[in-house]
Amino acid sequence: MAEEVVLMKGNEAIAHAAIRIGVDGYFGYPITPQSEVLETLAEQKPWETTGMVVLQAESEVAAINMVYGGAGSGKMVMTSSSSPGVSLKQEGISYIAGAELPCLVVNVMRGGPGLGTIQPSQADYFQTTKGGGHGDYHLIALAPASVQEMADFVGLAFDLAFKYRNPAMILADGVIGQMMEKVVLPEYRPRRIEEEILAQCPWATTGCKGRKPNIITSLELDPAIMEQRNLHLQAKYAEIEEKEARYEELDTEDAEYLIVAFGSCARIAQKAMEHAREEGIKVGLFRPITLWPFPSKALKERAKQVKGILTVELNSGQMIEDVRLAVECKVPVEHFGRLGGIVPDPDEVIEAIKEKLIQK
Amino acid sequence: MKEEIIIAGFGGQGVLSMGKILAYSGLMENKEVTWMPAYGPEQRGGTANVTVIVSDERISSPILSKYDTAIILNQPSLAKFENKVKPGGVLIYDGYGIINPPTRKDIHVYRIDAMDEANERKMAKTFNMIVLGGLLKIRPIVSIESVVKALRKTLPERHHHLIPMNEEAIRIGMDIIKEV
């Protein structure tokens, strides 16, 4: 049978993908511009089909702690929110990272700081990649640039989360969440049965009859043991950095200038790049797909051939720090961004290429 | 083939749903499509707009600087988008919503009195489909058959009896659109 192509919003794609790949539970609280995730799940009523739990919690804090509990028992559980709501979840995310549990958190970013605006933004890059909550931990952060990737990354995020026992985040923004595009949804995959969960998650709190109890906690009062735990986490993060960095390159082979952009900005930059090439300016696009681990090695390689790099972000310059670290300042790296919910159009990006890279 | 379109008017005029039907019609023809709404305060009263791109090839940016075609249904939207039509492009406006018509000479301007027509025929709810008919007359991006298919796909079954009326609205729009 031919794959069915449907037209839907990025947020709706997240919800449909979650049902199809066999997620056990979703716990959320509505907030623009991601409310369609919860709305779509409510419409689809997966509790009547796959048995998936969909629960509107009393708050974002409650939702993330429900995820903590579900993840501790080896279930595939997720939550979604937008920037202010994700700030509220940070304590829980840190605990989940500390307890080494797999889960998915979706952030469809909007402009901040504070309650900010409901318009698109990428100003939670630092929060996502540099901590957010307290302690030395990392999230595996995936940045979709299309509705198709919104659907695909739900499965990928859970695969990585379970592989490394680490929380994963899909970091989207209002553009990717709200726009409709063609999408092929993932194949239906039944929810795991108890035996499969026991086999996959020997660490989980699944009932300890006949074995020693599993304890899920991030608390350890003996600093000597706590240091060992941290070293274990760091070894895991090093392995993830080594193996899981993902990126996409467009027209980079002959590029003299490079745009680095993720999510919606990568799409806008691609159009700017097409126009710039029509004018004879050889621009290429490097799109990090994982923001952590950042694809530093590949970017460093590509940077060797270019005269300058422009990061395009819906913020005041956050990813630019990782770009500069990756290229070790051997190439000039400039930033162009719009703030507070304003999304630049492709012409503004072309102007920035000319002004910040070529005329310099 | 690639058509980059902005549809703009008041919230409640069916701007977003017209864009959605156009996007779905493109899907029926296996074209690439994006539909990017202004989802902010505009949607909650005031102006509403949506960018629709229908293309044979993969679409890069859902956000555009310039448009091939602008469908303008109220005065504030004309002020916002008249200058963003590509030279040689198309601007379609509804005579009811626009008091000061567009002034550019380097684009093709069309007027469609869709609101008046819809009211006269007591088909107010098909206003946006009349406009869509006008668009398809000038820019045959998708066929009427595909639009009907899209309606069948997107409308819940209990509304399927309204499809013939919508099809009629499209044909009316094709008849009444005039170059200015």
Image (cartoon, rainbow, N blue to C red):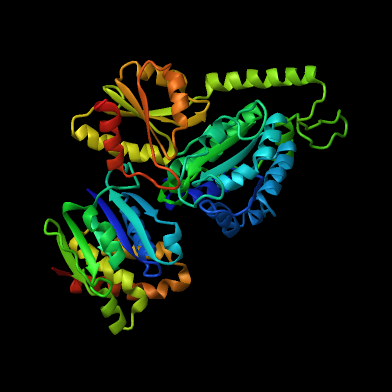
Q: Residue A234: percent from the left, percent from the top?
A: 64, 20
Q: Is residue A149 above or below residue B171?
A: above
- Visible in this render: residue A190? no
Quadrant in the picture for residue B70: bottom left
- A78 vs B134, left or right, is right
Q: Residue B69: percent from the left, percent from the top?
A: 23, 56
Residue drawn at (21%, 70%) of the image: B100
Q: Residue furthest left?
A: B105
Q: Is residue A77 above or below residue B84?
A: above
Which of A330 and A34 lies nearest the eye of the viewer? A330
Q: Residue B83: percent from the left, percent from the top?
A: 22, 55
Residue drawn at (21%, 59%) of the image: B140
Q: Residue B148: percent from the left, percent from the top?
A: 33, 65
- Visible in this render: residue A28? yes
Which of A169 and B132 lies nearest the eye of the viewer? A169
- B141 vs A43, left or right, is left
Which of A300 and A112 lies nearest the eye of the viewer? A112
Quadrant in the picture for residue B168: bottom left
- A92 vs B61, left or right, is right
Q: Residue furthest right?
A: A210
> Where is the C terminus of chain B found, in terms of image quarters?
bottom left
Q: How many marks?
A: 0
